[in-house]
Amino acid sequence: MDQMVLKTQEWLNKTYSGKHGFNKVKENGKPSWETIYGLTRALQIELGIAEPADNFGPATESKFVPLKKQKKTEKPTNLNYILQGAFWVKGKGFNPGGLTGNFFESTEDAVKRFQRAAGLAKQDGVVTAQIMKALLNMSAFTLVRNGDTKIRQIQQNLNRDYNAYFGLMPCDGVYSRETNKALIYALQKEEGMSTSVANGFFGPGTTSKCPTLKPGDSRTKFVLILQYALYCNGYSSGEFDGVYDAEVESAVSRFQSFMCLPVTGIANMATIKALLSSSGDTSRAAAACDTATILTAATAKTLRSNGYKVVGRYLTGNVRTSSGLKSKAMTPAELSIIFNEGLRVFPIYQDGGYESSYFVPNQGTTDAYAAVNAAQGLGFPSGTTIYFAVDFDAYDYEVTDKIIPYFNEIRAAFDKMESIPNSPKYKIGVYGPRNICIRTADAGLTEYSFVADMSTGFSGNLGYTMPKNWAFDQFYEHSIGTGSGAIGIDKDAYSGRDKGTASVTPSSDPVYDARVRTLRNILANIPALSSISELFTTMFIFDKTETVYESLYLDITLSTSLIFKKPSETSPGTLQVKNGKVGASITEVLGNSKTSLSSSQIHSYDELLKNIGLSVRNGYIMVNVSPSVESLDLSLTIFSNEIPVVDDTKTEMSATITFKIKKLYVSPSKPVVAPEEALPIDWGTIGVAVGGIIAAAVGVAAVVIVGTAAPEIAIGTAVSAVLFAIFGSQTAD
């Protein structure tokens, strides 16, 4: 807690509570936007603004009269209290000498220190509207922990030379959207634009007046802006001296090479615009593109004749057109056309992702399964990168809270699917604004980036450098070709890091392969089966029953059928699966009986249900328990009636996995005993009913075992341990 911030908050509430337009602030001693807003509204009340608001707008600026040092005989004023309170919220380094309401030497010194920190040439201790506006903001004017001293120098220099265009921006040493826009304002000023024309966006006017700079150029201010922009993008060119020397030429060449621009060492419009605007020069040629349109021979020829070598296409989904929904998913026929035309392809997965609400828990797992299954169905080989789309302007906190967890789920699902023998090993890519691409790459979650640079105003693009792992850079949307060859595309710069795919290996029997993929995904999610290599390496024969594991204590049989027999949804032990989601969770099914399970067991069973549901997609999961004196038979039946094949076709299948747990017998000390060799588990304490425990294993309605042929054998948590060994992870709490 900061005592002076607390005093500021208390003074605000005492002075302005009950006045129109003022909102009471929390008195907690913590610097916050709420306190800044309170100070701003207080200022507006003092200035006589009828409807106070949180922002320091044109009306506030026009009515503000500069504040300066008082005479010793003058009384405190509320405006001076507000000024001093703003300094305290701003933080260390700007001590105004208390919260007195008097503008004496200490307050004047604080103003001068702030003017110096902001980079202003004039450090006279007078508070202008520009300075007051900068103070009523949470932005830092001192170097922050992750700040760069040279970036801070750039920010201060820009404030010094161009503050009439954009006010005062933060001087914290962090390249940001404010710094990016200030650089564009500086360029516009040097191009001759007035303050009423310049807008901080690199539009047509700025583009048309953009200079071409080369070694020896005498236009010092333009060269300085170039040096600033190079450094902000990660390319040091020596001192900021406005001299276009060999160091500047080298930095320009390195940047051009990284961005796949012609390497000349001369900073032309395309180079300068690439430094200051995410889309760069949209008229430049591109070797790659992406489109939601299924390619025909005519449109593929249009792409090739226009110089395109790689095209991005979608694995699944639909696109809305004037005539309704239309498929955007790749087809085997389309891929043949693409390859026959000499083009390569990079696959994109997007069935949503246009807003923050899409990125909820389990969405990454769902999307990973859908994308991989589609890629496998089309025959994409190992090494192919699948780009998962984040198609909205996510703020940095949303990247932390939603996007990183989403890609963590994708990574975990990829690892799970790749553990299946003979499965293709795909790479993970991301489509999104620069910040998302950088953050996911830094977290080790993505191999390559497909950068959404066309959205130049995105907060995730402005003030962010190009991701080091960029493979494709989307920068302009337009149409090319005529007649049957006309097609709408997005132009994508192409780095060559991901060359795309030049061929696929389509299945000779896609229906069979789709069923096998679904079955193996199901089996891989059951720990007791995932280690039986024969299930994943040998040829499946459907419509048969076979024993896949046999021992003295446990037999496992697998039975498959190509005929989908819909079970009754009301029958005990049946759960419906819709769009990869199971109709109930373990905790919903168990109710109070879940207390008999450890947290790791509940988590494992939930994961089992979730992952099997993703493999089933649409259908049912059903369990049947058959106890006897000698054994306990647990059958898990999976019904899947909408297995995607290709070209929007679907097939169906059911599979039953039966676990026969044998050699349960009575012991005086342990009523239910199984030799340790049966399964490597802890049998636990003995119970009297299996209902809730069986339910926990597979998430179904309770089945209570009573009155068996050998009722003296009470099966309880011992069976739970068996089921946990079969279905759950072996992770201890």
Image: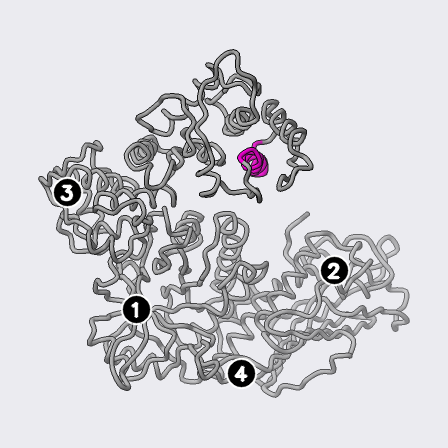
Q: Nearer the viewer, mark 1 or mark 4?
A: 1
Residue where numbered disc 2 is placed: 587
The answer to whether marks 2 and 4 mark residues whose Cβ atoms lie closer than 8 Å is no
Using the image, tell me which numbered label, if any, was put on residue 667.
none
Q: Which amino acid does the dot numbered 1 rest on?
A: Cys
- For the residue labelled by badge 3, is the local secondary structure a helix, a strand or a loop? helix
Residue where numbered disc 4 is placed: 541
* The image quarter in which residue 322 lies: bottom left
Crowd rating for badge 3 (residues with CA inside 10 Å; few <14, some 14–19, many 20+): some
* The image quarter in which residue 142 lies: top left
Considering only order in the chain, which callout, 4 or 2, is on the residue closer to the N terminus?
Answer: 4
Q: Which amino acid does the dot numbered 3 rest on?
A: Glu
Q: Which amino acid does the dot numbered 2 rest on?
A: Thr
- Write the residue at 78% across / 74% down: 626
- Write the residue at 43% across / 28% down: 66
Q: Position of residue 209 (x, y in %)?
A: 19, 52
The answer to whether marks 3 and 2 mark residues whose Cβ atoms lie closer than 8 Å is no
Residue where numbered disc 1 is placed: 289
- The residue furthest top is 72
Reply yes or no: does residue 32 show up in magenta: yes
- Write the residue at 46% across / 74% down: 316
- The number of numbered badges drawn on the structure is 4
Numbered range of the magenta stretch = 31-47
Residue where numbered disc 3 is placed: 249
The answer to whether marks 2 and 1 mark residues whose Cβ atoms lie closer than 8 Å is no
As drawn, is 664 to the left or to the right of 524? right
